Image (cartoon, helix red, strand yellow):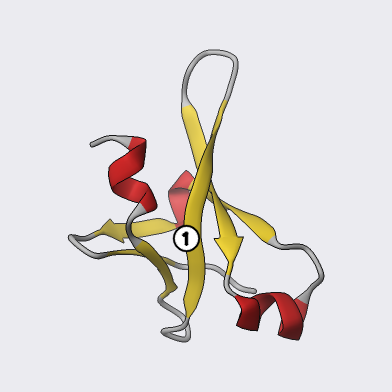
Amino acid sequence: MRLSDLQNKDVINMNDGKKIGNIIDVNIDMSGKMNGLIVEKTKFFISMFTSKDEVEIKWDQIEKIGEDVILVKTSF
């Protein structure tokens, strides 16, 4: 799977069923291992919870990568 394939998917929080946003980048360490996804938050998350417009989803928070969505478990 390519990054461009992931960028077309919505990132959904499994805890509340709400859309977090869409992938804009990935976090890769010096050894080349992908640590997480950088997600640009939807306007709802930006205005309600923080002024920061992006969030990192750690690789271990990803539960399922589906055809249209990426399901994650996170607590924000």
Q: Quadrant of residue 39?
A: bottom right
Amino acid at pointer 1: Asn
Q: Secondary structure at mark 1?
A: strand
- At x 47%, y 31%, the residue is 34
- At x 47%, y 23%, the residue is 33
Q: Report whether 14 appears left or right of 68.
A: right
Question: Where is residue 2 drawn, in percent x and y?
Answer: 28, 35
Q: Report whether 57 appears left or right of 3.
A: right
Question: Where is residue 48 drawn, in percent x and y?
Answer: 73, 85
Is residue 65 depicted above or below 32 in this figure? below
Quadrant (top left/top right/bottom left/bottom right) for the N terminus: top left
Is residue 38 depicted above or below 13 in this figure? above
Q: Residue extending furthest right? A: 51
Q: Residue extending furthest left? A: 67
| Numbered circles on residues, count | 1
**Residue named by callout 1:** 22
Q: Residues within 10 Å of mark 1 (few under 14, many from 20)?
A: many
Q: Report whether 10 appears left or right of 19.
A: left
| Viewer-side residue, 10 vs 14 | 10
- At x 71%, y 62%, the residue is 53
Is residue 20 depicted above or below 55 in this figure? below
Q: Quadrant of residue 72?
A: bottom left
Q: Quadrant of residue 75?
A: bottom right
Quadrant (top left/top right/bottom left/bottom right) for the C terminus: bottom right
- At x 40%, y 56%, the residue is 62
